[in-house]
Image (cartoon, rainbow, N blue to C red):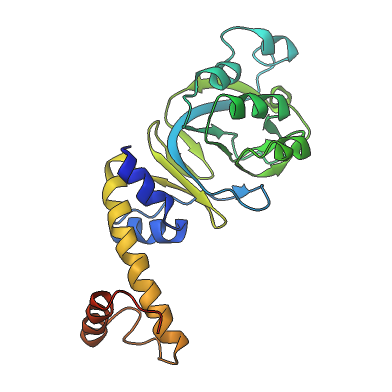
């Protein structure tokens, strides 16, 4: 993702991004059950680095695996690039934590953008005190090895009912988390800015007493009025 695209997306609401994707026929991109945990919310944009958990199998999951050098969740903490978003397939288990406060602190120190998961977070209060952006299912005390086994890194995953491919663009704010196919990110950012510009105009006119039909979505008269508004420098009156 180039700097211009990132800057554009950072200036867009997730709701706007959702509409831009819908206009391109892409619907299943908003994560279900994944919510902002920080208060206030910390909006984020970044490329996805993925971690996948699989169902528990006792010979694959126990406290002893945590220290193994090939244990994927520990590798993820050290290998996710600065600026990326660690997206964890927690199998939709809100009652099981995918990470806790020590690992969240490490992600913060390494310059990772955020954690996104459809699983839970343990040591939740300590995690949030770190000021690191977290979008997850909520607090959960059981560690991952209680009900998960380690899967793999940097592979296609499901998170919140949405497919996530490594390198996809993750955007999140108070409305939730959305996945943008990387190939569409630049045009979504560009066209989204224009959508929000027109919506500012439409909201201004509605606040002045105009009825919604004809303004949102615009008819030809509204489009002409919008062009005049742009030419006048987008006045507030």
Query: In front here: 204 or 169?
Result: 204
Residue at 43% across / 50% down in the picture?
A: 10
Q: Is residue 1 left or right of residue 150?
A: left
> Image quarter for residue 139?
top right
Q: Is residue 140 visible?
A: no
Instruction: Mark yes or no: residue 52 visible.
Output: yes
Out of 207 and 22, give the one closest to the viewer: 207
Please name whichever residue, 117 or 197, is drawn nearer the observer in this view of the structure.
197
In the displayed structure, does residue 83 sit left or right of residue 196? right
**Up-down relation of residue 109 to residue 48 (above or below):** above
The image position of residue 59, as x and y in percent, is 67, 11
Q: Please state, as top left, top right, bottom left or bottom right, where the C terminus lies in the image.
A: bottom left
Image quarter of residue 27: bottom left
Please state which of residues 18 and 57 is positioned toward the viewer in this rendering. 18
Query: If the image is split into quadrants, where does the N terminus sit?
Result: top left
Residue at 47% x, 86% y: name it.
Answer: 207
Q: Position of residue 208 (x, y in %)?
A: 44, 90
């Amino acid at each position: 993702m180039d700097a211009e695209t990132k800057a554009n997306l950072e200036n867009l609401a997730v709701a706007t991004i959702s509409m831009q994707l819908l206009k391109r026929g892409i619907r299943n991109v908003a994560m279900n059950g994944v919510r902002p945990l920080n208060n206030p919310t910390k909006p984020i944009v970044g490329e996805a680095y993925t971690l996948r958990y699989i169902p528990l199998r006792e010979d694959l999951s126990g406290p002893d695996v945590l220290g193994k050098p090939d244990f994927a969740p520990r590798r993820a903490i050290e290998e996710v690039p600065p600026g990326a978003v660690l997206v964890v397939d927690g199998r939709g288990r809100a009652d099981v934590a995918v990470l806790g406060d020590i690992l969240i602190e490490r992600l913060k120190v390494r310059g990772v953008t955020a954690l996104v998961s459809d699983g839970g977070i343990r040591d939740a209060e300590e995690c949030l005190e770190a000021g690191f952006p977290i979008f997850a299912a909520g607090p959960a005390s059981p560690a991952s090895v209680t009900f998960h086994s380690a899967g793999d890194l940097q592979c296609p995953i499901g998170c919140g009912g949405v497919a996530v491919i490594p390198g996809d663009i993750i955007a999140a704010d108070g409305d939730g988390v959305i996945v943008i196919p990387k190939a569409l990110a630049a045009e979504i950012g560009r066209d989204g800015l224009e959508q929000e510009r027109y919506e500012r105009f439409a909201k201004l006119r509605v606040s002045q007493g105009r009825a919604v039909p004809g303004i949102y979505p615009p008819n030809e008269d509204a489009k002409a009025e919008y062009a005049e508004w742009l030419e006048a420098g987008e006045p507030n009156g």
